Amino acid sequence: MTLGELGEFGFIDKLRTWAPDAQIDDDAALVQIGGSTFAMTTDALVEGVHFRTDWSSPEDIGWKAVTVSVSDLAASGGGSSSWLLLAVGAPRETSSGFLEGIYRGAGQACASYRAHLVGGDTVSAHEVFLSVTAIGPVFGQGLRRSGARVGDVLAVTGPLGRAAAGANLLLSQDPKKVVPEDAMACIEAHRRPVARIESAERFAPVAHGAIDLSDGLASDARRIAEASGYGVAIDALPIAPEVERIAAARGWDAEVMALSGGEDFELVFSLPDEHVGDLIPIGRVVDHGVVYKGEPMPMSGYDHFPESGNL
């Protein structure tokens, strides 16, 4: 069976038997070191899959690579004061200026997240790729997707869909009918996403579980349900206002971009009602099922190994 036939979720199911000790149901592995709990994660960004060099500057690419991994730490109850290793692969003809830009962008992200780039690797490759390994302390024992409890509110750190709208604008190469400020806000969300470490610091002490929205709410809500053994009922979808306006102007579906586009890197916490604070409630943890506005959740979201391609 090929990866395309398995799909990303099918591949992950296989990993449960191939690597039984791996913590594959969470954004990061939680490990005990010297009596303290640390989150550890690794993420790869590949040219043509996660970024295009004609869309993003080298600094943007370096920033995004760091953000993706730090966001996983944040979803595990940490994110700040972390250490990172950056591996870069590139063709032999890649300019040193391009590589310098990648490390400059990674350094900018590290400074923003109070993280430290302490090492890495370089290798020859057919296209540019970056792989970041990150480790950092978490609050208490950390957060897992499996921590969700029946009755918990599901609440998100911000509105959704900007990154998907930005990617669609870049794909279309047609800015007609779109307010420039809306377009730039969405394009920047694609190029330079932000890890919500401040929210992790605030809500990790009171939340039962969390996930970061890297693949889209449709996929990631299902992951909460599968990991916790319960269900989720989503009854609200906070769509970014720029996305609403762009979708109306271009004839696109704002709901699909917010629900399935991915790469928003907002956090979804499962937590008691009294601790929701300024988070945006979107639903609850229930006994069973994965439901969106009273109907079964569509099987959509980013899949790295789809049979027929991604949006």
Image (cartoon, helix red, strand yellow):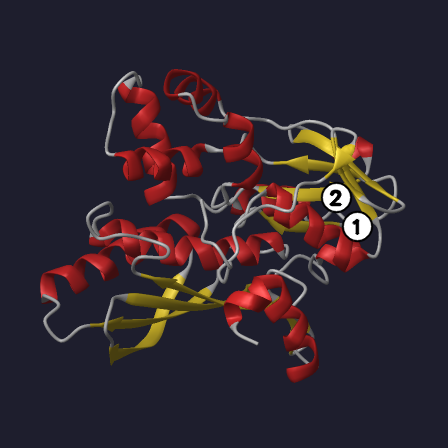
Residue shown at 25% from the left, 76% from the top: 125
Looking at the figure, which quarter contains the C terminus? top left
Amino acid at the residue labelled 2: Ser
User: Observer-nearest residue: 145 or 223?
Assistant: 223
Q: Which mark is residue 148?
A: 1
| Residue 76 higher or lower than 122, as above or below | above
Q: Where is residue 210 in the image (x, y as percent from the top left)?
A: 68, 50
User: Observer-nearest residue: 262 or 306?
Assistant: 306
User: Observer-nearest residue: 205 or 23?
Assistant: 23
Residue shown at 13% from the left, 68% from the top: 94
Q: Where is residue 186 in the image (x, y as percent from the top left)?
A: 37, 32
Q: Position of residue 116 (x, y in %)?
A: 39, 64
- State the separation of the CA atoms marked 2 and 1: 6 Å
Is the Cβ of the residue at disc 2 closer than 8 Å to that at disc 1?
A: yes
- Residue identified by numbered label 2: 270
Could you tell which of marks 2 and 1 lies nearer the N-terminus? 1
Quarter location, residue 143? bottom right
